[in-house]
Image (cartoon, rainbow, N blue to C red):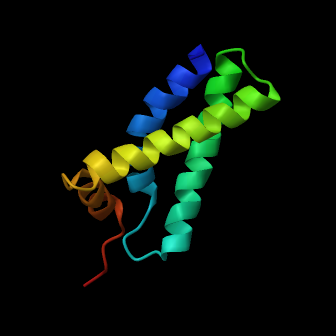
Amino acid sequence: MTNAQMWALIIGFVSPLLISAVNQPHWPSAARAAVQITVSVLVGLGTAYFAGDFAGKDIVTSILIASVSAISAYKGIFKPTGVSPTVEHLTSPKPRP
């Protein structure tokens, strides 16, 4: 495993917290998925670039690792424990009385 892939795994693992801060509970599933994909692409690009592995296959691998790591962490830890839904609720605009 390269440094870029390891960093993509680590940052991808904690990225559901960032994704939850951006996503809103009332958004459709497609919009929420688009945010997750966008964050995973940015994590993969960033880790490949900063690790000096900014080449075709390394970029794609880093993006896929970040995405799988984020989805796994969300489904396995952040959603079941209520962390992601709580972050979404706390960062969502409140309706005016």
- Asked if residue 79 lies left or right of residue 39, the reply is left
Determine the residue positioned at 71% across, 14% down. Answer: 52
Compared to 53, does 19 lie above or below? below
Q: Quadrant of residue 34?
A: bottom right
- Asked if residue 57 lies left or right of residue 8, the reply is right
Compared to 4, does 26 lie above or below? below
Judging depth in this view, the residue of 22 and 40 nearest the camera is: 40
Q: Quadrant of residue 44?
A: top right
Compared to 32, does 18 lie above or below? above
Q: Quarter of the image containing the N terminus?
A: top right
Determine the residue positioned at 48% across, 73% down. Answer: 29
- Asked if residue 32 lies left or right of residue 78, the reply is right
- Asked if residue 68 lies left or right of residue 74, the reply is right
Q: Quarter of the image containing the C terminus?
A: bottom left
Residue 39 percent across, percent down from the top left: 56, 46
Determine the residue positioned at 24% across, 58% down. Answer: 86
Residue 27 percent across, percent down from the top left: 46, 74
Res 17 visible: no
Residue 58 percent across, percent down from the top left: 72, 26
